[in-house]
Image: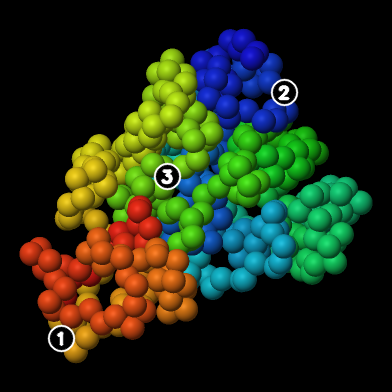
Amino acid sequence: MPNYTSDFLNVLAARGFIHQCSDAAAIDQLAAKGGLVAYAGYDATAPSLHIGHLTTIMMLYWLQETAAGKPIALTGGGTTRVGDPSGKDETRQLRSIEEIEANTTAMKTGFGRVLRFGEGATDAVMIDNGEWLARLNYIEFLRDVGRHFSVNRMLTMDSVKLRLERDQELSFIEFNYMLLQSYDFVELARRLGCNMQLGGSDQWGNIVMGIDLGRRMGTGQLYGLTCPLLMTSAGTKMGKTAAGAVWLNEDMLPAYEYWQFWRNVEDAQVETLMKRFTTLPIDEIDRLSRLGGSEINEAKKILATAATTMMHGKAKADAAAETARVTFEKGELASDLPTVEITRGELAGGLGVLSAFVAAGLVKSNSEARRQVQGGGLKVNDRSVTDDKLMLREADLTSDGVVKLSLGKKKHVLLRPV
């Protein structure tokens, strides 16, 4: 591993964040004297960030923590109207301006959990690219910016080339995305003195094009640094479960379920995830990663609590850990388990067990619930469901006034009549 002058690059290297870097020596010198102004961009495609975004947020965190410079969280109120084709097999659905604005507002929660915002030299700032992109004059943009781009080169970009090779449609509006992203870099350099862009490895081509555009438009030297994408052992992007994305906002994913995601990661991922998504010391991570057998589960609990503390605070992380302990180790009910309310009349009249599991969000359809019954995967109040025509009634309520539904060993929801 290279030995850098700056704490920033030494931390990133030790924690596995560095994949590609445009000029490591120059970035190292700037970081050592607190001269970096670095941004990462986040399109407003949903009302919350997810853990796929968390890698670059953590890179901004370490930029701030090591006093290497100022972090910029760029929200894509403008670029979201176009849609990033990177890593996509089909054209993104276009969103309304109202939806994009609502998503942008909701995304602030995720940034604020990790980054410190303010007026200081290393305090983070958040800015939306809609401020300049929405005001662009198309003819002037083509003349002043578009003339610096080679279509020949753009066709070699992975986000474009793969779609064309697979004979998949690539809309003209998506083809323009890389121009807009490159222009973001230039605009941030002019407005805020930004000199570096951070991103996932799939963004390297776009970052290099932004650096080149800055040189052509006279911004001064710009830099880029990418991190490896999070991948599962099956070779797919990490960050989603069968139920969907792992959201950072608690109104999208309760803190307990966030904790459970980290608790249930693959054994081989524990070391990497501890380095990326916690602030645990490296020597402690090295010790925990050497644990084998059943001891690796203790390391996963530490990972889950540390990662949840980072995003939701210590109190909620500790509560999630205690809920898991009570539920899985003692076999008791815990009040912090996800709860879904139903009407008391539904139970009084008899609620079909398949419908109950669908209502709880543990399965997506009655047919999926039926398959789980056939495979022995469903339980009501810790008793296996063997009859898919079973009706849940008030007599099934526990002393706590709930019905506990379980899918497998690790997913539980309480039904509470109101």
Quadrant in which the C terminus appears: bottom left
Quadrant position of residue 357: bottom left
Instruction: Pinpoint residue 195: horizontal percent, then vertical percent.
Output: 63, 32
Query: Which sits earlier in the primary sequence, circle 2 or circle 1?
Result: 2
Instruction: Pinpoint residue 404: horizontal percent, then vertical percent.
Output: 23, 64
Task: Give me the C-alpha separation between circle 2 and circle 1.
Answer: 69 Å
Task: Give me the C-alpha separation between circle 3 and circle 1.
Answer: 36 Å
Give the residue type that dot 1 points to: Ala
Q: Which of 84 and 296 lies nearest the eye of the viewer?
A: 296
Residue 348: which disc? 1
Residue 264: which disc? 3
Tell me: residue 162, above or below residue 64: below
Q: Nearer the viewer, mark 2 or mark 1?
A: 1
Asked if labels 2 and 3 touch by Cβ distance under 8 angstroms, the answer is: no
Circle 3 crowding by C-alpha within 10 Å: few under 14, some 14–19, many from 20 = some
Q: Nearer the viewer, mark 3 or mark 2?
A: 3
User: Visible in this render: residue 125?
Assistant: yes
Q: Which of 3 and 22 lies nearest the eye of the viewer?
A: 3
Tell me: residue 357, above or below residue 41: below
Circle 1 crowding by C-alpha within 10 Å: few under 14, some 14–19, many from 20 = few
Label 1's element? Answer: helix
Q: Is residue 181 left or right of residue 410?
A: right
Task: Give me the C-alpha separation between circle 3 and circle 2.
Answer: 38 Å
